[in-house]
Image (spheres, rainbow, N blue to C red):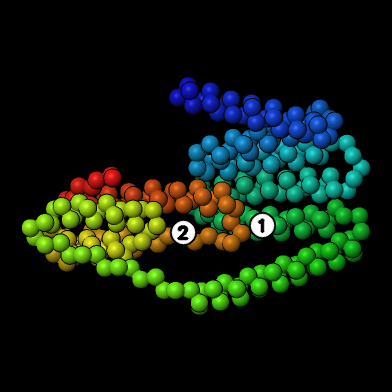
Amino acid sequence: MGNEKDSIVATLLVGSATWGLIFLFLTRSIVPSAVMGFGAGLLTLARSVERFRDLLVRGLGFALLGAGVLIFKTGAWYRSFIAVSLFWVGFLYALAYIGVRRYESDFVERNLLAFALMGFLFAFLLTYPDTARALSYVIYLLASGAIVYLTYLVSSYIGTRLGRDERIQPLPLPTLETRRDLYAHDIRRIYSSFVEKGEKAPLVVFLVRNAPDGIDDGQLARILRPIIEYSPPRFSPLTPQWVVEKKLNDERARRARILLRVLRSLGVGVGTE
């Protein structure tokens, strides 16, 4: 426990010092650089913080970045734009944490990038000196984005239609004499298929074919229900990549727990190789 805390503190200090020096080089201002450096250090630390708490750490990090930009003395209009944008992102992370913890909903987290982009547009409209010109820029940007997105949809549709249909090869049905050896061999193969990729059909077929004697259809259905009803998470195209990676890791762990629980219910031992 002590080593873990020391590692966290070291990561925060090193990250804060490194980013603080970078900001000091860019701004030539000590206090804003220190504040922004600490905020960037928190963002660096967030990668090693446990799930969900990392949302609060990221929110605080973006808020400190915004505060550092805000106290930086410059008359340029983009100072307010950057500060408001960073504060908005920090608020979104805090809102995502509340949604997950209090309401068990990851809606804000899954669509955080979309909400952030909306906030950036409003911040630009509020802070740009010429509102009419800012509005024309936003309209042009939205129109360009719509064209790019439509192009992406069309190309994705064409690629899907022209793609080859990958068929799952049926698993062999073991004979009674070699049932144990083939079972041990195949269960390792389908373990990887289900846990790593979420492919449940081969697993269900295999377990149904190799169900222990004495289990009736009703019992087997109840045992296999967690696998049959499992569905992988869906992500918005605008979901941040770090959120996707963390959720995919969480899903792999959840699929492993589901598989082990089902196999134990069937009275089956599982190899890890």
Reply above or below: 59 against 6.
Answer: below
**Residue 130 x/y as whole percent:** 92, 59
Residue 165, picture quadrant: bottom left
- Relative to 198, is 150 on the left or the right? right
**Residue 129 x/y as whole percent:** 91, 55
- Residue, x 29% and y 54% (percent of image)? 189
Residue 27, picture quadrant: top right
Question: Pointer 1: residues within 10 angstroms few (<14), some, or many (20+)?
Answer: some
Disc 1 target residue: 115
Image quadrant occupied by the N terminus? top left
Disc 2 is placed on an element classified as: loop
Question: Pointer 2: residues within 10 angstroms few (<14), some, or many (20+)?
Answer: few
- Residue, x 39% and y 53% (percent of image)? 196
Q: Which amino acid is tagged 2?
A: Pro
- Relative to 4, is 219 on the left or the right? left
- Residue, x 70% and y 40% (percent of image)? 63
Q: Observer-nearest residue: 144 or 80? A: 144
Q: Which amino acid is tagged 1?
A: Phe
Disc 2 target residue: 233
**Residue 82 x/y as whole percent:** 79, 47
Give the mark nearer the N terminus: 2 vs 1.
Answer: 1
- Residue, x 66% and y 73% (percent of image)? 150
- Relative to 257, is 251 on the left or the right? right
- Relative to 52, is 33 on the left or the right? right
